[in-house]
């Protein structure tokens, strides 16, 4: 049994509606990414597949890469999703099949929209900072965006403000009268919360959203649950506010969104709706068809797709229930 399934629901705190299912701690598991990077995968899990349209959460680092190449992920494809990349430390160069070559550094945001198909690579430059630390998130695209054109946006300036002991940086969505420039296709929120003192953070929330809190660095406490670095706490729906505390210097990511009710097939780098859709994407990638294009200025051979499983891929909803 997945250990998260045995965790009891927490006592409902103030500000949480009666329908809230209670919080669930999702510790994640380690997954190799490329030759030199290991990430902690926090979504999807058996106990929780999604948070709003956020369908994938990888947290990596902090890693000492002073004497190593850092991130080295060769060209690979995506369909049906957006990638949202955020660094706390380090530098990565994004290259894609639209011709974009874009470094990303701490405090900047990369949003890549795959639509029907795109390819990209992610590499640390030869001369790079000694630490690598960040997150990559996937957003499931709804119809018709998932069948639309690919795109890429880099945001060097994001809304930032101080409230009490906490600094807020808004990556996606709207909060406290501020709005991110990042374009998404369903109602979503992603905000970094950085603790500069012992006082609590008390962001106002939307009751129709479901939320989760990722501890990227430092230790935090919310709903009576202690969060260690690299853990994700699913917070459910029905909340109009949140109160959390953390060690000074901690950095947390609050994710939220309207529940995404379209069942998904997630396999390798593809987000689809059926086995046939994913199988077609794999075949197109392996055949080098124009659907994904070629990554600009990256001489490395593209990553081959793994073999499809011998059983049919089935769609799952946000709770993990099978469809079809």
Image (cartoon, rainbow, N blue to C red):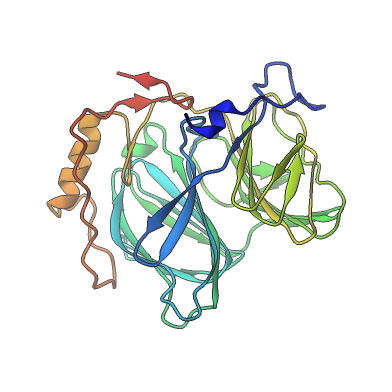
The residue sitting at 58% across, 52% down in the picture is 181
Left or right: 107 with respect to 31? right
Q: Position of residue 35 (x, y in %)?
A: 34, 66
Is residue 68 depicted above or below 215 in this figure? below
Picture coordinates of residue 189, whole percent (x, y): 61, 42
Q: Is residue 41 above or below residue 218?
A: above
User: Residue 165's quadrant in the figure?
Assistant: bottom right
Q: Relative to 286, say whether 22 is above or below.
A: above
Instruction: Name the residue located 20 percent from the left edge and 31 percent from the top edge.
Output: 276
Q: In this view, does 80 lie to the left or right of 274?
A: right
Q: In this view, does 163 lie above or below 311?
A: below
Report the label total.
Answer: 0
Quarter residue 274 falls in: top left
| Quadrant of residue 69 within the rendered picture | bottom left
Nearer the observer, 61 or 298: 61
* Left or right, 80 with reference to 302: right
Percent coordinates x, y for residue 150 in the rendering: 34, 50
Residue 301 position within the rendered picture, expressed as x and y whole percent measured from the top left: 21, 66
Residue furthest top in the image: 18
* Residue at 49%, 32% in the rendered image: 2
* Residue 157 in sight: yes
- Identity of the residue drawn at 22% across and 50% down: 305
Which of 218/128 is in front?
218
For the C terminus, the image quarter is top left
Q: Is residue 176 visible?
A: no
């Amino acid at each position: 049994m997945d250990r998260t399934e045995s965790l009891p629901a927490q006592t409902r705190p103030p500000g949480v509606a009666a329908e809230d299912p209670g919080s669930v701690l999702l510790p994640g598991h380690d997954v190799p990414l490329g030759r030199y990077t290991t990430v902690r995968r926090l979504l999807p899990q058996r106990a929780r597949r999604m948070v709003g349209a956020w369908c994938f959460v990888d947290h990596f680092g902090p890693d000492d890469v002073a004497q190593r190449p850092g991130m080295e992920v060769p060209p690979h494809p995506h369909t049906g999703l957006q990638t949202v990349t955020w660094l706390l430390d380090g530098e990565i160069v994004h290259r894609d099949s639209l011709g974009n070559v874009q470094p990303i550094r701490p405090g900047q945001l990369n949003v890549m929209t795959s639509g029907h198909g795109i390819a990209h690579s992610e590499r640390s430059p030869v001369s790079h900072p000694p630490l690598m630390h960040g997150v990559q998130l996937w957003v499931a695209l709804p119809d018709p965006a998932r069948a639309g054109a690919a795109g890429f946006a880099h945001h060097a300036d994001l809304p930032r403000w101080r409230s009490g002991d906490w600094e807020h940086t808004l990556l996606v969505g709207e909060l406290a009268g501020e709005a991110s420039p990042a374009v998404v296709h369903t109602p979503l929120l992603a905000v970094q919360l950085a603790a500069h003192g012992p006082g609590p953070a008390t962001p106002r929330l939307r009751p129709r959203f479901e939320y989760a809190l990722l501890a990227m660095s430092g230790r935090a406490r919310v709903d009576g649950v202690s969060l260690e670095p690299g853990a994700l706490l699913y917070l459910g729906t029905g909340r109009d506010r949140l109160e959390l505390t953390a060690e000074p210097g901690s950095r947390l990511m609050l994710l939220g969104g309207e529940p995404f009710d379209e069942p998904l097939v997630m396999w390798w780098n593809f987000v689809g709706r059926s086995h046939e859709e994913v199988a077609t994407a794999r075949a197109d990638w392996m055949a080098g068809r124009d659907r994904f294009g070629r990554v600009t200025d990256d001489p490395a051979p593209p990553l081959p797709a793994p073999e499809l499983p011998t059983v049919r891929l089935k769609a799952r909803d946000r709770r993990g229930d099978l469809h079809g």
